[in-house]
Amino acid sequence: MATGLTTIDYLVVAIYLVGTLALGLWIGRRVKTGKDFFLGGRQLPWWAIGMSLVATDIGGTDIIGVGGAAFAHGLAVANFEWIGCVPAMIVAAFVFIPYFWRIGVYTIPEFLERRFNASLRSALALCWLIFMACNLGIMLLASAKMMGAMVNVEAVSDWFGWEVERSLAIARIQWVCILATAAMVGVYTCAGGLAAVVYTDMIQCAVMIAGCLLVVALGLIEIGGISGLREGIAQHESDTLTESEVGDSVDAAQTRRGRERTSLILPVDTATPFPWTGIFFGLALILSPAYWIGNQAIVQRSLGAKSEFEAKAAYIWGALLKNIIPFIVAVPGLIALVMFPQLEDGDQAFPKLVSVLLPTGLRGVFLAAFIAALMSSIDSYLNSASTIVTNDFYRRFVNVQADEQRILLIGRGVTLLLVLWAIFFAGYLMGRSEGIYAIFQTMMAFFQGPALAVLMSGLLWRRATGTAALIGFIAGVLSSIGLFALTQPQVYTALGWKPLFQISEPFLYFSVWAFLVSLSLIVPISLCTKPDPASKQQYVVFATESQNGEPR
């Protein structure tokens, strides 16, 4: 079967993209104020928000990155969708999201100023801005990798008149993909704001799930079903045993490694980045609630819901959809391991499956689904990053009296600047060898633990003070960055130390220790400092006093 895209495939993709762009621009006609742009006029329905939550969370980085992680390390990466999403979404739906909606904030950092102080608001807003801006580049890179694996490089080179070697042609194709994706998403996000993001995400979610399920089904058929998958993994482990493992016991080593590939719970001494301790303490208790309760790109959708009930219902609907996601993003990595065991780059696992399994036409449908997934994440982070810049910096420190039309103009201008930055950062990442998923998760681990410590102490404990929260947050972020630095070979070798962690890519442990550092400072410093005034303490989620914050 041919592995390149045909004219029919390109036509399918073009029709889909034009339709998405048209929808976003049509919605943009209704955007008249800053509130319309950033919160969809608070008129968004629960069913659209729920699908948008899922589409945002399983964008191009997940389709490429999770498949690549499963190819390299096994099924344990699926925990990032199950234990890493569903429990936290349910808790958030019934406790925290309705509360944020009631007090009418635009951003999570804005809430932290109401609860603590402006310094903490700015610190967290800056962290989120840096993360989301960099993540935009990561997602554009994911689109480039997919296109580089799927297109017929020779045909494209002939069409453009490129007389260069294959590697350079692939690089040029990736650049074209980055520029085209950035331009398209930037246009409809600038035009329609959050409403365009949510409604296009809804369609993209359905297309994406259907496309990924198709790849899984055809892949399992190709390798002989579940039994064929197990046999293929066992054969791969047998073929890759080391000399020491062969000397001990071939059967025992093969069985142990095969189980690690297909198990959700891995031992502490696993060679993968996903030991059960990291999954439970780092993911389930820290990164997951920090993501679903404090991630601006996620929470902002529910802040635009029609009512408190619909904000809650959106999270429940999203949690239900989340249960099928591991099957469609992680299992393909295992299928690719069986079909292409010599593949050097795990991030090419999913694109390779698509190019080999899907016939002409369907290949274009899936590529459209992948681009949909990618765009759903890019537009979300574009809109949310713009919200933070406009509301937490410009509106807070530059022009407090800015009217809604001015805020709308600034929001659109910031969106365009972020698009340009994303293109630059994607180009920088093209020259690096790290897996997409590892880059994404490591960046989150730098500040998600401290952010959760600050957010939970502010939401649940009256006695927490702004001074303590700020000190705890900064110390936690510095500790996570320090741990990351000490895991770099050039650093610990120069110091004459042994590695702090025995697993590869220990980002889950960064979040645990950073959270503990922050919390261990917030509690005693709060008890040693003067309590915040009652106007601050009323923002504890279970406070009996009425909240006086009104939607702006």
Image (cartoon, helix red, strand yellow):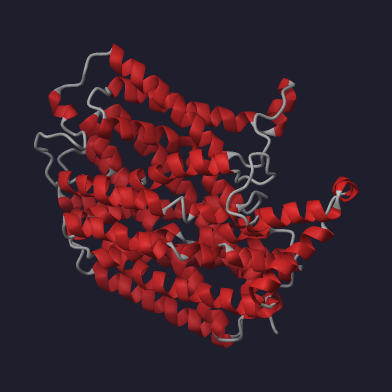
Would you say 234 lies left or right of 124 here? Answer: right
Q: Residue at x 43, y 75 (%)?
A: 207
Q: Position of residue 303 (x, y in %)?
A: 23, 52
Q: Residue at x 34, y 31 (%)?
A: 454
Q: How many marks?
A: 0
Q: Residue at x 37, y 78 (%)?
A: 19
Residue 415 found in image quarter: bottom left
Question: Toward the viewer: 268 or 289?
Answer: 268
Q: Position of residue 547 (x, y in %)?
A: 11, 38
Q: Residue at x 27, y 67 (%)?
A: 47
Is 529 situated above or below 381?
A: above
Q: Tell me if I can see residue 29 in this picture.
A: yes
What is the quadrant of the N terminus in the image? bottom right
Would you say 491 lies left or right of 102 here? Answer: right
Residue 78 found in image quarter: bottom right
Q: Position of residue 356 (x, y in %)?
A: 67, 78
Question: Toward the viewer: 315 or 277?
Answer: 277
Q: Tell me if I can see residue 33 in this picture.
A: no
Q: Position of residue 155 (x, y in %)?
A: 68, 80
Is 111 situated above or below 241?
A: above
Would you say 146 lies left or right of 125 here? Answer: right
Is 274 situated above or below 32?
A: above
Question: Toward the viewer: 389 or 413?
Answer: 389
